[in-house]
Image (cartoon, grey):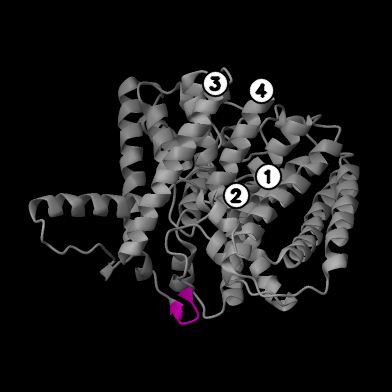
Amino acid sequence: MQYRTIIRITGLLMGLFSLSLLPPAVVAVIYKDGGGMAFIQAFVLCLILGFTLWYPNRAHRKDLRTREGFLLVVLFWVVLGSIGAVPFIFSGQPSLSLTDSFFESFSALTTTGATVIVGLDSLPKAILFYRHLLQWLGGMGIIVLAVAILPVLGVGGMQLYRAEMPGPVKDSKMTPRIAETAKALWYIYLALTVACAVAYWLAGMDVFDAICHSFSTIAIGGFSTHDASMGYFDSPTINMICVVFLLIAALNFSLHFAAFSRRGINLRVYFRDAEFKVLIAIQLVLTAICFATLYGSGIYDSAEETFDYALFQAVSISTTAGFGTESFHAWPLFLPILLIFSSFIGGSGGSTAGGIKVIRVILLLLQGSRELKRLVHPRGMFSIRISGNALPDRVIDAVWGFFSAYALVFVVCMLILMAQGMDAITAFSATAACLNNLGPGLGEVASNYASIGDGEKWVLLFAMLFGRLEVFTLLILFTPTFWKN
Protein backbone atom coordinates (compact mmCIF):
# COMPACT_ATOMS: atom_id res chain seq x y z
CA MET A 1 0.00 0.00 0.00
CA GLN A 2 1.52 3.31 -1.11
CA TYR A 3 0.65 5.25 2.03
CA ARG A 4 2.96 8.20 1.49
CA THR A 5 1.68 8.68 -2.06
CA ILE A 6 -1.89 8.59 -0.73
CA ILE A 7 -1.03 11.17 1.97
CA ARG A 8 0.61 13.41 -0.65
CA ILE A 9 -2.45 13.30 -2.91
CA THR A 10 -4.78 13.89 0.05
CA GLY A 11 -2.76 16.98 0.97
CA LEU A 12 -3.01 18.27 -2.60
CA LEU A 13 -6.75 17.73 -2.65
CA MET A 14 -7.13 19.57 0.66
CA GLY A 15 -5.23 22.48 -0.87
CA LEU A 16 -7.51 22.46 -3.89
CA PHE A 17 -10.61 22.16 -1.71
CA SER A 18 -9.51 25.20 0.33
CA LEU A 19 -10.17 27.31 -2.79
CA SER A 20 -13.90 26.48 -2.47
CA LEU A 21 -13.91 28.42 0.82
CA LEU A 22 -13.07 31.71 -0.90
CA PRO A 23 -16.26 32.28 -3.00
CA PRO A 24 -18.51 32.31 0.13
CA ALA A 25 -16.16 34.91 1.65
CA VAL A 26 -16.61 37.04 -1.49
CA VAL A 27 -20.40 36.62 -1.18
CA ALA A 28 -20.14 37.84 2.43
CA VAL A 29 -18.34 40.98 1.22
CA ILE A 30 -20.92 41.62 -1.52
CA TYR A 31 -23.91 41.29 0.82
CA LYS A 32 -22.12 42.68 3.91
CA ASP A 33 -23.61 39.92 6.06
CA GLY A 34 -20.61 39.52 8.39
CA GLY A 35 -20.23 35.83 7.64
CA GLY A 36 -16.93 35.97 5.77
CA MET A 37 -14.43 35.61 8.62
CA ALA A 38 -15.38 31.97 9.31
CA PHE A 39 -14.49 31.09 5.71
CA ILE A 40 -11.16 32.95 5.78
CA GLN A 41 -10.22 31.11 8.98
CA ALA A 42 -11.29 27.79 7.49
CA PHE A 43 -9.34 28.55 4.30
CA VAL A 44 -6.12 29.21 6.23
CA LEU A 45 -6.57 26.09 8.37
CA CYS A 46 -7.32 23.89 5.36
CA LEU A 47 -4.33 25.26 3.45
CA ILE A 48 -1.98 24.65 6.39
CA LEU A 49 -3.23 21.10 6.92
CA GLY A 50 -2.94 20.33 3.21
CA PHE A 51 0.60 21.70 3.07
CA THR A 52 1.54 19.71 6.19
CA LEU A 53 0.42 16.48 4.51
CA TRP A 54 1.91 17.28 1.10
CA TYR A 55 5.34 18.78 1.84
CA PRO A 56 7.03 15.83 3.63
CA ASN A 57 5.71 13.44 0.96
CA ARG A 58 6.08 15.61 -2.14
CA ALA A 59 8.72 13.32 -3.73
CA HIS A 60 6.62 10.17 -3.46
CA ARG A 61 5.04 9.65 -6.88
CA LYS A 62 4.17 6.01 -7.42
CA ASP A 63 1.44 4.41 -9.53
CA LEU A 64 -1.82 3.65 -7.77
CA ARG A 65 -3.32 0.20 -7.77
CA THR A 66 -7.00 -0.57 -7.39
CA ARG A 67 -6.71 -0.92 -3.61
CA GLU A 68 -5.13 2.49 -3.21
CA GLY A 69 -7.85 3.93 -5.47
CA PHE A 70 -10.61 2.73 -3.16
CA LEU A 71 -8.82 3.96 -0.03
CA LEU A 72 -8.11 7.34 -1.61
CA VAL A 73 -11.74 7.85 -2.64
CA VAL A 74 -12.97 7.14 0.89
CA LEU A 75 -10.28 9.38 2.37
CA PHE A 76 -11.25 12.22 0.04
CA TRP A 77 -14.87 12.13 1.12
CA VAL A 78 -14.15 11.69 4.82
CA VAL A 79 -11.37 14.28 4.97
CA LEU A 80 -13.04 16.87 2.75
CA GLY A 81 -16.40 16.35 4.45
CA SER A 82 -14.66 16.99 7.76
CA ILE A 83 -12.88 20.08 6.45
CA GLY A 84 -16.19 21.25 5.02
CA ALA A 85 -17.61 21.30 8.55
CA VAL A 86 -15.04 23.87 9.75
CA PRO A 87 -16.89 27.00 8.50
CA PHE A 88 -20.04 25.81 10.29
CA ILE A 89 -18.01 25.34 13.49
CA PHE A 90 -16.41 28.79 13.25
CA SER A 91 -19.59 30.59 12.21
CA GLY A 92 -21.66 32.36 14.83
CA GLN A 93 -24.83 32.18 12.73
CA PRO A 94 -26.05 29.50 12.62
CA SER A 95 -24.65 28.33 15.93
CA LEU A 96 -24.10 24.62 15.33
CA SER A 97 -22.59 21.97 17.56
CA LEU A 98 -19.69 19.81 16.37
CA THR A 99 -22.05 16.98 15.46
CA ASP A 100 -24.47 19.28 13.63
CA SER A 101 -21.60 20.90 11.70
CA PHE A 102 -20.34 17.53 10.49
CA PHE A 103 -23.88 16.38 9.68
CA GLU A 104 -24.59 19.50 7.60
CA SER A 105 -21.27 19.28 5.76
CA PHE A 106 -21.54 15.60 4.87
CA SER A 107 -25.21 16.02 3.95
CA ALA A 108 -24.23 18.76 1.50
CA LEU A 109 -21.18 17.04 0.05
CA THR A 110 -23.00 13.73 -0.45
CA THR A 111 -25.96 15.68 -1.97
CA THR A 112 -28.30 14.16 0.61
CA GLY A 113 -30.00 17.45 1.47
CA ALA A 114 -30.91 16.56 5.06
CA THR A 115 -30.47 19.64 7.23
CA VAL A 116 -30.26 20.46 10.92
CA ILE A 117 -30.62 24.20 10.31
CA VAL A 118 -33.91 25.98 11.04
CA GLY A 119 -34.47 29.57 9.89
CA LEU A 120 -32.75 29.54 6.50
CA ASP A 121 -34.40 32.81 5.46
CA SER A 122 -32.48 34.74 8.13
CA LEU A 123 -29.05 33.15 7.60
CA PRO A 124 -26.08 35.07 6.15
CA LYS A 125 -25.89 34.78 2.38
CA ALA A 126 -22.37 33.39 2.66
CA ILE A 127 -23.56 30.35 4.63
CA LEU A 128 -26.46 29.76 2.24
CA PHE A 129 -24.16 29.97 -0.78
CA TYR A 130 -21.61 27.65 0.84
CA ARG A 131 -24.21 24.93 1.51
CA HIS A 132 -25.22 24.95 -2.15
CA LEU A 133 -21.63 25.11 -3.38
CA LEU A 134 -20.81 21.98 -1.36
CA GLN A 135 -23.73 20.20 -2.98
CA TRP A 136 -22.64 21.30 -6.42
CA LEU A 137 -19.10 20.04 -5.87
CA GLY A 138 -20.35 16.76 -4.44
CA GLY A 139 -22.94 16.29 -7.16
CA MET A 140 -20.60 15.20 -9.88
CA GLY A 141 -17.96 14.14 -7.40
CA ILE A 142 -14.92 16.01 -6.23
CA ILE A 143 -13.00 12.91 -7.21
CA VAL A 144 -13.99 13.18 -10.88
CA LEU A 145 -12.77 16.76 -10.85
CA ALA A 146 -9.54 15.56 -9.32
CA VAL A 147 -9.17 12.88 -11.97
CA ALA A 148 -8.93 15.63 -14.57
CA ILE A 149 -6.09 17.22 -12.59
CA LEU A 150 -4.21 14.29 -11.07
CA PRO A 151 -2.62 13.08 -14.35
CA VAL A 152 -0.79 16.42 -14.48
CA LEU A 153 0.57 15.60 -11.02
CA GLY A 154 1.83 12.21 -12.16
CA VAL A 155 -1.00 10.00 -10.91
CA GLY A 156 -3.18 7.80 -13.11
CA GLY A 157 -6.90 8.28 -12.66
CA MET A 158 -8.63 5.09 -13.76
CA GLN A 159 -8.57 3.55 -10.28
CA LEU A 160 -10.29 6.61 -8.82
CA TYR A 161 -12.85 6.76 -11.60
CA ARG A 162 -13.84 3.12 -11.11
CA ALA A 163 -14.33 3.61 -7.38
CA GLU A 164 -16.22 6.89 -7.64
CA MET A 165 -18.54 6.74 -10.64
CA PRO A 166 -22.05 5.46 -9.81
CA GLY A 167 -23.51 2.53 -11.71
CA PRO A 168 -22.78 -1.18 -12.23
CA VAL A 169 -20.68 -0.90 -15.40
CA LYS A 170 -17.67 1.14 -14.35
CA ASP A 171 -15.16 0.46 -17.11
CA SER A 172 -17.06 2.31 -19.84
CA LYS A 173 -15.44 5.61 -20.79
CA MET A 174 -16.79 8.29 -23.11
CA THR A 175 -13.33 9.25 -24.34
CA PRO A 176 -10.12 7.18 -24.65
CA ARG A 177 -8.34 8.96 -21.79
CA ILE A 178 -9.82 9.09 -18.30
CA ALA A 179 -8.73 12.72 -17.80
CA GLU A 180 -10.60 13.72 -20.94
CA THR A 181 -13.63 11.80 -19.68
CA ALA A 182 -13.61 13.69 -16.39
CA LYS A 183 -13.25 17.02 -18.17
CA ALA A 184 -16.13 16.16 -20.51
CA LEU A 185 -18.33 15.34 -17.50
CA TRP A 186 -17.57 18.67 -15.87
CA TYR A 187 -18.16 20.65 -19.06
CA ILE A 188 -21.59 19.07 -19.37
CA TYR A 189 -22.23 19.63 -15.65
CA LEU A 190 -21.22 23.29 -15.83
CA ALA A 191 -23.28 23.94 -18.97
CA LEU A 192 -26.39 22.44 -17.37
CA THR A 193 -25.84 24.51 -14.22
CA VAL A 194 -25.59 27.76 -16.19
CA ALA A 195 -28.68 26.91 -18.24
CA CYS A 196 -30.65 26.06 -15.10
CA ALA A 197 -29.61 29.29 -13.34
CA VAL A 198 -30.63 31.41 -16.35
CA ALA A 199 -33.99 29.62 -16.56
CA TYR A 200 -34.68 30.20 -12.86
CA TRP A 201 -33.73 33.86 -13.19
CA LEU A 202 -35.99 34.38 -16.20
CA ALA A 203 -38.83 32.68 -14.28
CA GLY A 204 -38.65 35.22 -11.46
CA MET A 205 -35.92 34.22 -9.00
CA ASP A 206 -33.36 36.84 -8.05
CA VAL A 207 -29.76 36.20 -9.12
CA PHE A 208 -28.65 34.77 -5.76
CA ASP A 209 -31.55 32.32 -5.47
CA ALA A 210 -31.21 31.32 -9.13
CA ILE A 211 -27.52 30.45 -8.76
CA CYS A 212 -27.97 28.60 -5.47
CA HIS A 213 -30.96 26.58 -6.64
CA SER A 214 -29.25 25.73 -9.93
CA PHE A 215 -26.38 24.26 -7.89
CA SER A 216 -28.68 22.07 -5.82
CA THR A 217 -30.94 21.15 -8.78
CA ILE A 218 -28.20 19.87 -11.11
CA ALA A 219 -26.50 18.16 -8.15
CA ILE A 220 -29.92 16.66 -7.23
CA GLY A 221 -29.17 17.79 -3.69
CA GLY A 222 -32.34 19.53 -2.57
CA PHE A 223 -30.95 22.33 -0.40
CA SER A 224 -32.82 25.62 -0.62
CA THR A 225 -32.25 29.18 0.57
CA HIS A 226 -35.69 29.17 2.19
CA ASP A 227 -37.35 27.01 4.83
CA ALA A 228 -40.34 26.55 2.51
CA SER A 229 -38.01 25.23 -0.24
CA MET A 230 -39.49 25.68 -3.74
CA GLY A 231 -42.88 26.38 -2.16
CA TYR A 232 -41.50 29.80 -1.18
CA PHE A 233 -41.72 30.99 -4.80
CA ASP A 234 -45.27 29.69 -5.37
CA SER A 235 -44.65 29.49 -9.11
CA PRO A 236 -45.77 26.64 -11.41
CA THR A 237 -43.21 27.88 -13.96
CA ILE A 238 -40.33 27.54 -11.51
CA ASN A 239 -41.65 24.13 -10.47
CA MET A 240 -41.68 22.95 -14.08
CA ILE A 241 -38.15 24.25 -14.70
CA CYS A 242 -37.01 22.34 -11.63
CA VAL A 243 -38.71 19.15 -12.85
CA VAL A 244 -37.11 19.40 -16.30
CA PHE A 245 -33.59 19.91 -14.99
CA LEU A 246 -33.98 17.24 -12.30
CA LEU A 247 -34.89 14.75 -15.02
CA ILE A 248 -31.93 15.87 -17.14
CA ALA A 249 -29.56 15.53 -14.18
CA ALA A 250 -31.03 12.12 -13.31
CA LEU A 251 -30.00 10.74 -16.72
CA ASN A 252 -26.69 9.07 -17.41
CA PHE A 253 -24.26 11.85 -18.30
CA SER A 254 -22.68 9.68 -20.99
CA LEU A 255 -26.02 9.99 -22.84
CA HIS A 256 -25.70 13.78 -22.79
CA PHE A 257 -22.14 13.45 -24.09
CA ALA A 258 -23.24 11.12 -26.89
CA ALA A 259 -26.25 13.28 -27.81
CA PHE A 260 -24.27 16.53 -28.01
CA SER A 261 -20.91 15.30 -29.28
CA ARG A 262 -18.71 17.08 -31.80
CA ARG A 263 -20.38 15.16 -34.61
CA GLY A 264 -23.64 17.06 -34.03
CA ILE A 265 -26.82 16.80 -32.00
CA ASN A 266 -28.43 13.36 -31.99
CA LEU A 267 -31.42 13.14 -29.62
CA ARG A 268 -32.21 9.60 -30.80
CA VAL A 269 -29.45 8.45 -28.46
CA TYR A 270 -31.82 8.95 -25.53
CA PHE A 271 -34.69 6.97 -27.01
CA ARG A 272 -32.45 4.03 -27.86
CA ASP A 273 -31.36 3.72 -24.24
CA ALA A 274 -33.34 1.21 -22.14
CA GLU A 275 -32.56 2.94 -18.84
CA PHE A 276 -33.87 6.28 -20.15
CA LYS A 277 -37.17 4.70 -21.22
CA VAL A 278 -37.65 2.94 -17.88
CA LEU A 279 -36.79 6.10 -15.90
CA ILE A 280 -39.35 8.18 -17.80
CA ALA A 281 -41.95 5.40 -17.43
CA ILE A 282 -41.41 5.35 -13.66
CA GLN A 283 -41.91 9.13 -13.46
CA LEU A 284 -45.11 8.96 -15.52
CA VAL A 285 -46.57 6.16 -13.39
CA LEU A 286 -45.69 7.88 -10.11
CA THR A 287 -47.14 11.19 -11.29
CA ALA A 288 -50.34 9.50 -12.47
CA ILE A 289 -50.79 7.69 -9.14
CA CYS A 290 -50.16 10.85 -7.11
CA PHE A 291 -52.45 12.93 -9.32
CA ALA A 292 -55.31 10.42 -9.22
CA THR A 293 -55.09 9.99 -5.44
CA LEU A 294 -54.82 13.72 -4.68
CA TYR A 295 -57.56 14.67 -7.15
CA GLY A 296 -59.86 12.04 -5.72
CA SER A 297 -59.20 13.33 -2.21
CA GLY A 298 -60.11 16.89 -3.22
CA ILE A 299 -57.16 18.45 -1.37
CA TYR A 300 -56.47 21.10 -4.01
CA ASP A 301 -58.86 23.47 -5.72
CA SER A 302 -58.27 22.55 -9.36
CA ALA A 303 -56.90 19.79 -11.57
CA GLU A 304 -54.07 22.10 -12.71
CA GLU A 305 -52.93 22.78 -9.15
CA THR A 306 -53.19 19.09 -8.29
CA PHE A 307 -51.09 18.12 -11.31
CA ASP A 308 -48.46 20.75 -10.43
CA TYR A 309 -48.01 19.36 -6.92
CA ALA A 310 -48.21 15.73 -8.02
CA LEU A 311 -45.64 16.08 -10.82
CA PHE A 312 -43.18 18.14 -8.78
CA GLN A 313 -43.17 15.93 -5.69
CA ALA A 314 -43.13 12.68 -7.66
CA VAL A 315 -40.06 13.75 -9.64
CA SER A 316 -38.34 15.49 -6.73
CA ILE A 317 -38.58 12.54 -4.34
CA SER A 318 -38.05 9.72 -6.86
CA THR A 319 -34.90 11.35 -8.28
CA THR A 320 -33.67 11.80 -4.65
CA ALA A 321 -33.60 15.62 -4.84
CA GLY A 322 -35.94 16.22 -1.91
CA PHE A 323 -37.19 19.69 -2.91
CA GLY A 324 -40.65 20.52 -1.63
CA THR A 325 -43.57 22.66 -2.67
CA GLU A 326 -45.90 20.98 -0.22
CA SER A 327 -45.51 18.79 2.87
CA PHE A 328 -45.76 15.47 1.05
CA HIS A 329 -45.62 13.62 4.38
CA ALA A 330 -49.11 14.99 5.10
CA TRP A 331 -50.56 13.60 1.86
CA PRO A 332 -53.33 11.01 2.24
CA LEU A 333 -53.21 7.22 2.22
CA PHE A 334 -50.08 5.48 0.93
CA LEU A 335 -48.51 8.35 -1.05
CA PRO A 336 -45.75 9.32 1.43
CA ILE A 337 -44.55 5.72 1.75
CA LEU A 338 -44.82 5.21 -2.03
CA LEU A 339 -42.59 8.22 -2.68
CA ILE A 340 -40.04 7.11 -0.07
CA PHE A 341 -39.91 3.67 -1.70
CA SER A 342 -39.45 5.28 -5.13
CA SER A 343 -36.27 6.94 -3.87
CA PHE A 344 -34.72 3.48 -3.53
CA ILE A 345 -34.74 3.28 -7.34
CA GLY A 346 -33.33 6.79 -7.78
CA GLY A 347 -31.96 7.96 -11.12
CA SER A 348 -29.79 6.48 -13.84
CA GLY A 349 -26.33 5.08 -13.34
CA GLY A 350 -23.73 7.74 -14.13
CA SER A 351 -26.04 10.54 -12.96
CA THR A 352 -25.97 12.79 -9.90
CA ALA A 353 -29.00 11.02 -8.38
CA GLY A 354 -28.86 8.63 -5.43
CA GLY A 355 -30.61 5.33 -4.81
CA ILE A 356 -29.91 1.87 -6.20
CA LYS A 357 -30.11 3.23 -9.77
CA VAL A 358 -32.58 2.35 -12.51
CA ILE A 359 -30.12 0.17 -14.43
CA ARG A 360 -29.65 -2.11 -11.43
CA VAL A 361 -33.40 -2.43 -10.93
CA ILE A 362 -33.77 -3.38 -14.61
CA LEU A 363 -31.05 -6.03 -14.26
CA LEU A 364 -32.61 -7.42 -11.08
CA LEU A 365 -35.98 -7.77 -12.83
CA LEU A 366 -34.39 -9.38 -15.89
CA GLN A 367 -32.47 -11.79 -13.69
CA GLY A 368 -35.68 -12.69 -11.86
CA SER A 369 -37.37 -13.32 -15.19
CA ARG A 370 -34.45 -15.51 -16.31
CA GLU A 371 -34.71 -17.62 -13.17
CA LEU A 372 -38.41 -18.19 -13.84
CA LYS A 373 -37.57 -19.34 -17.37
CA ARG A 374 -34.91 -21.69 -16.01
CA LEU A 375 -37.49 -23.30 -13.72
CA VAL A 376 -39.60 -24.16 -16.77
CA HIS A 377 -36.61 -25.03 -19.02
CA PRO A 378 -33.78 -26.27 -16.76
CA ARG A 379 -31.42 -26.89 -19.69
CA GLY A 380 -32.20 -23.66 -21.51
CA MET A 381 -29.55 -21.00 -22.13
CA PHE A 382 -30.90 -17.51 -21.48
CA SER A 383 -28.88 -14.32 -21.75
CA ILE A 384 -29.69 -10.94 -20.23
CA ARG A 385 -29.63 -8.12 -22.77
CA ILE A 386 -29.72 -4.36 -22.36
CA SER A 387 -30.35 -2.32 -25.51
CA GLY A 388 -29.61 -5.44 -27.56
CA ASN A 389 -26.27 -6.15 -25.86
CA ALA A 390 -25.77 -9.34 -23.84
CA LEU A 391 -24.26 -8.73 -20.41
CA PRO A 392 -21.71 -11.07 -18.82
CA ASP A 393 -22.79 -12.97 -15.71
CA ARG A 394 -20.09 -11.10 -13.76
CA VAL A 395 -22.15 -7.90 -14.03
CA ILE A 396 -25.31 -9.67 -12.86
CA ASP A 397 -23.45 -11.19 -9.90
CA ALA A 398 -22.12 -7.75 -8.98
CA VAL A 399 -25.64 -6.28 -9.06
CA TRP A 400 -26.98 -9.01 -6.79
CA GLY A 401 -24.04 -8.48 -4.45
CA PHE A 402 -24.64 -4.75 -4.39
CA PHE A 403 -28.35 -5.19 -3.69
CA SER A 404 -27.63 -7.58 -0.82
CA ALA A 405 -25.07 -5.22 0.72
CA TYR A 406 -27.41 -2.25 0.26
CA ALA A 407 -30.23 -4.08 2.03
CA LEU A 408 -27.89 -5.18 4.83
CA VAL A 409 -26.60 -1.64 5.46
CA PHE A 410 -30.19 -0.35 5.44
CA VAL A 411 -31.40 -2.91 7.99
CA VAL A 412 -28.38 -2.45 10.30
CA CYS A 413 -28.67 1.37 10.29
CA MET A 414 -32.41 1.24 10.88
CA LEU A 415 -32.06 -1.21 13.80
CA ILE A 416 -29.33 0.93 15.41
CA LEU A 417 -31.59 3.99 15.20
CA MET A 418 -34.48 2.09 16.76
CA ALA A 419 -32.15 0.80 19.50
CA GLN A 420 -31.43 4.46 20.36
CA GLY A 421 -35.15 5.10 20.89
CA MET A 422 -36.30 6.34 17.48
CA ASP A 423 -39.79 5.25 16.43
CA ALA A 424 -40.15 2.80 13.54
CA ILE A 425 -41.54 5.21 10.92
CA THR A 426 -38.88 7.85 11.61
CA ALA A 427 -36.09 5.24 11.68
CA PHE A 428 -37.24 3.67 8.41
CA SER A 429 -37.67 6.94 6.54
CA ALA A 430 -34.52 8.58 7.95
CA THR A 431 -32.39 5.59 6.96
CA ALA A 432 -33.98 5.49 3.51
CA ALA A 433 -33.59 9.25 3.06
CA CYS A 434 -29.89 9.24 4.01
CA LEU A 435 -28.83 5.97 2.36
CA ASN A 436 -30.63 7.00 -0.85
CA ASN A 437 -29.22 10.56 -0.53
CA LEU A 438 -32.77 11.89 -0.54
CA GLY A 439 -32.98 14.23 2.48
CA PRO A 440 -36.52 14.65 3.82
CA GLY A 441 -38.17 11.74 5.61
CA LEU A 442 -41.30 11.08 7.61
CA GLY A 443 -42.22 11.41 11.25
CA GLU A 444 -39.70 13.31 13.34
CA VAL A 445 -37.45 14.07 10.31
CA ALA A 446 -40.19 15.28 7.96
CA SER A 447 -39.00 18.90 8.06
CA ASN A 448 -35.43 18.71 9.40
CA TYR A 449 -33.08 16.60 11.51
CA ALA A 450 -32.48 19.14 14.29
CA SER A 451 -34.51 17.32 16.94
CA ILE A 452 -32.87 13.88 16.78
CA GLY A 453 -29.96 12.88 19.02
CA ASP A 454 -26.25 13.18 18.25
CA GLY A 455 -25.76 9.40 18.13
CA GLU A 456 -28.56 9.08 15.61
CA LYS A 457 -27.02 11.82 13.45
CA TRP A 458 -23.68 9.99 13.30
CA VAL A 459 -25.42 6.79 12.21
CA LEU A 460 -27.21 8.69 9.46
CA LEU A 461 -23.98 10.43 8.45
CA PHE A 462 -22.40 7.03 7.80
CA ALA A 463 -25.54 6.03 5.88
CA MET A 464 -25.02 9.08 3.63
CA LEU A 465 -21.44 7.99 2.96
CA PHE A 466 -22.49 4.42 2.20
CA GLY A 467 -25.11 5.72 -0.24
CA ARG A 468 -22.83 8.22 -1.96
CA LEU A 469 -19.98 5.73 -2.34
CA GLU A 470 -22.39 2.99 -3.43
CA VAL A 471 -21.77 0.74 -0.40
CA PHE A 472 -18.93 -1.42 -1.75
CA THR A 473 -16.35 1.37 -1.99
CA LEU A 474 -16.70 1.96 1.76
CA LEU A 475 -17.60 -1.58 2.82
CA ILE A 476 -14.51 -3.07 1.20
CA LEU A 477 -12.31 -1.21 3.69
CA PHE A 478 -13.80 -3.31 6.50
CA THR A 479 -12.72 -6.62 4.96
CA PRO A 480 -9.43 -8.30 6.06
CA THR A 481 -8.68 -9.19 2.41
CA PHE A 482 -8.36 -5.52 1.49
CA TRP A 483 -5.47 -4.96 3.92
CA LYS A 484 -3.53 -8.11 3.01
CA ASN A 485 -0.70 -7.83 0.48
Residue type pointed to by label 4: Gly
Q: Is residue 227 above or below residue 315?
A: above
Q: In which quadrant of the rendered image does the C terminus lie? A: bottom right
* Distance between the alpha carbons at the discs numbered 1 and 4: 31 Å
Disc 3 secondary structure class? helix
Residue type pointed to by label 2: Tyr
Q: Is residue 23 above or below residue 159?
A: above
Pointer 1 or 3: first along the chain:
1
Identify the residue position indicated by label 1 in the image. Answer: 209
Quarter occupied by residue 9: bottom right
Identify the residue position indicated by label 4 in the image. Answer: 453
The answer to whether one can see residue 227 in this image is no
Residue at the far left: name it.
376
Comparing marks 2 and 4, which lies closer to the viewer?
Answer: 4
Identify the residue position indicated by label 3 in the image. Answer: 419
* Distance between the alpha carbons at the discs numbered 1 and 3: 40 Å
Q: In which quadrant of the rendered image does the N terminus lie? A: bottom right
Q: Is residue 354 left or right of residue 50?
A: left
Pointer 2 or 4: first along the chain:
2
Disc 1 secondary structure class? helix
Identify the residue position indicated by label 2 in the image. Answer: 200
* Distance between the alpha carbons at the discs numbered 1 and 2: 8 Å
Pointer 1 or 4: first along the chain:
1
The residue sitting at 46% across, 45% down in the picture is: 355
Residue type pointed to by label 1: Asp
Q: Residues within 10 Å of mark 1 (few under 14, many from 20)?
A: many
Comparing marks 1 and 3, which lies closer to the viewer?
Answer: 3
Q: Measured from the top left, where is residue 479 in percent x and y?
A: 54, 50
